[in-house]
Image: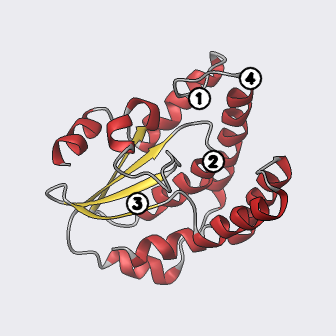
Amino acid sequence: MLSIIQAALQNSFSYAEYRTLVSKLIQEGQSTGNEQSADLLHYSELNETRMNRLEKTLKMDSEVLKTLENLKSKQTWIVISEGWCGDAAQILPIIKLMTETSENIKLKIVLRDENEVLMNQFLTNGSKSIPKLIILDENLNLINHWGPRPEAAKNLIIDYKAKHGIVDETAKIALQKWYLDDKGISTMKEITKLL
């Protein structure tokens, strides 16, 4: 596992580098990832708007802030993502905000399609669902992992799929509304419990 993580870190981005890459690709009419389509480009554009908004409006939960400020050991957080992923657009700004509150956490982002070996270590029910947060200690040993979405958001999609048989645009809109109403609190609290 260590060699897989080290290889991924060699191929990783800071949050700012990730945002720059996604923006540059959008300007070129592309998205991140192996697959290219008008839909993925459209989702990338929507996600860029979402991330811009979240970066301006997110507030740190006070309990989470205390926990992160009191974190004594150094950690590396790797997030597996892609620019077209709606859940990643909602969650990456939250993780960025969390890592900024502790000098002991270093954040790195890797693209799923460019890091398949790493992604295959963290499948969700056999699928390459993202984002996936991997929390490592200072020696790059696995502490825990989380993702692709908070429990309540996951249940919203499971319930919708059970009732309607598919995850369609209506489900995606309901999920985005859930994220908007939650304001990142569920994500912050769930991740903090893993530390």
Q: In this figure, which residue is indicated by the disc labeled 1? A: 23
Disc 4 to disc 3: CB gap under 8 Å: no
Q: Amino acid at mark 1?
A: Ser
Of labels 4 and 1, earlier in sequence is: 1
> Which badge, 4 or 2, is on the more N-terminal residue?
4
The residues tagged by marks 3 and 2 sit, at their Cα atoms, a distance apart of 16 Å
Residue 56: which quarter of the image? bottom right
Disc number placed over residue 100 in the picture, else none: 3
Image coordinates for residue 89, horizontal then vertical, percent:
61, 48
Residue placed farthest to the left in the image? 139
Whether the residues at callouts 3 and 1 have beta carbons within 8 Å, the answer is no
Sequence-earlier tag: 3 or 1: 1
Amino acid at circle 3 = Glu
Q: Are marks 3 and 2 in contact (CB under 8 Å)?
A: no
Q: CA distance from mark 4 to mark 1?
A: 16 Å
Q: Residue at x 81, y 48 (%)?
A: 168
Circle 4 residue: 38
* Left or right: where 144 falls relative to 139: right
Front label number (3 vs 2): 2
Q: CA distance from mark 1 to mark 2?
A: 11 Å
Q: Residue at x 52, y 48 (%)?
A: 130
Query: Which mark, by number, is residue 51?
Result: 2
- Residue 89 appears anywhere in the view: yes
**Closest to the observer: 2 or 54?**
2
Residue 105 percent coordinates (x, y): 30, 60
